[in-house]
Image (cartoon, rainbow, N blue to C red):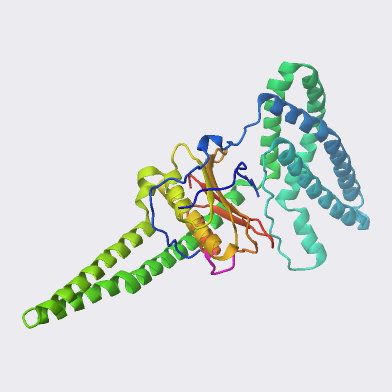
Amino acid sequence: MTSPAPEQPPLYLVPAGDGVDADVVASPVQNRPSAADTPEPEQPSLVARGFRAAGFMIAGFPVNLLAFILIVTLFSVGVGTLVIWLGLVVLLVATKVAFGFAAVNRAMIRGMLGVDIPTPKIAYDESGSFWQRYLRRLTHQQMWRNVAYQLIAFPLACFEFPLALAGIVILPVGLFVLPVVASLHVLLAKWLLGPPETEELTQKAERLQASRARGVDAAEAERRRIERDLHDGAQQRLVAVAMGLGRAKTKMDADPDAAKALIDEAHADAKLAVSELRDLARGIYPAVLGDRGLDAALSSLAAKCPIPVEVNVVIDPRPPAAVESTAYFIVGECLTNIAKHSGATEVRVNAWREERPTGDLVIVDITDNGTGGASMRPGGGLAGLADRAATIDGVMTVVSPIGGPTVIRADLPCVW
């Protein structure tokens, strides 16, 4: 068995296959770094939250001031000059400005407060003339939600700006008041700048529908694999056993020595059939995974890999069985592909549990120093692994530039 050679700490990338042919051996990887050495994701401290909130409020004041002036001016001029048609052009510019400042505010909230507000998906009817299409954009509810946010955000910024300055000087205000005010601002932004509830439900339904379709395809592919393995392996062995025993039966009286040889041959085939059935069962759900968890299961995969593998697993408490099995098969198939095609000399496998507001994730990261060039082609092994991850609403990403390194990451939710 191989042991990991590299001594450097594990690499973590935070955003960013056809069946596992591996027998499970519950033996640890020698000299594997302790799971306690793997850093867990850090949560922002109270001071950091205060400084982020203060920076957001100070930076937001000039942005919201400019947005308020431009939007009020453009809409006032546009409405006032509608009688001479110039107003339509001005209002067209005003809609672009409203959407632009909405995007800027979402980016500021994401960059400074770490809260991602999804951009609403707006589907317009593109039929009719240019002005008809423009009128539909002008009257779309999201445009007026953007305008409403800017009209509310400016007086709110007039309150937040001096409060942020006071929070920099007065410690209790900076530590306890500013984060609360920033959270209220984020709630307002989510309400007006984010997708409405109906759109969120529609997007979730679309994701679930796509996930179900990919899950059905992955299950069908797995069924075909099991059927093929049974037909080409254990079934053929058992047929040979039956034929050998039949021949031995006919020779038992006339030629006992030949019958004994046939029985020995049938016995050997029966043992091979049992071994193949055991391997097939392990490929469906390995016993070591259910008994000892993901750490021992990944260690057993690494121990069989011909390339040195460094494994770091920090997952406590244990995730659901579906998450563990998905992570196991992703790592197993990736190690098989790396050994066959990558030309790598070392591999790092990191797995950890990460808390998110929407629910915990198990994140699996496989990094090798091979030649790169891997991609998720339709019908390929990596696409099959992505389909497997999608059955539990997981997401798999591949970063593999030519020349390497290759990083394969799977984000697997513990609740779906």
Query: Which quadrant of the structure image shows residue 318?
Result: top left
Query: Which quadrant of the structure image shows residue 109?
Result: top right
Q: Position of residue 35 (x, y in %)?
A: 51, 38
Q: Is residue 208 above or below residue 350?
A: below
Residue in view at x 71 percent, y 63 percent: 125
Dominant secondary structure, magenta: loop
Does the segment drawn in magenta span residue 205?
Answer: no
Q: Is residue 209 visible?
A: no
Q: Is residue 375 above or below residue 104?
A: below
Q: Nearer the viewer, residue 182 or 350?
A: 350
Residue in view at x 79 percent, y 26 percent: 159
Q: How many marks?
A: 0
Q: Nearer the viewer, residue 270 or 286?
A: 270
* Residue 181 shown left or right of residue 292 in the figure: right
Q: Is residue 195 above or below residue 384?
A: above
* Residue 415 shown left or right of residue 180 in the figure: left
Q: Nearer the viewer, residue 232 or 303?
A: 303
Query: Which quadrant of the structure image shows residue 248?
Result: bottom left
Residue in view at x 81 percent, y 65 percent: 130
Q: Which segment is the magenta one?
A: 376-381
Q: Position of residue 25 (x, y in %)?
A: 38, 52
Q: Position of residue 95 (x, y in %)?
A: 81, 51
Q: Position of residue 364 (x, y in %)?
A: 54, 48
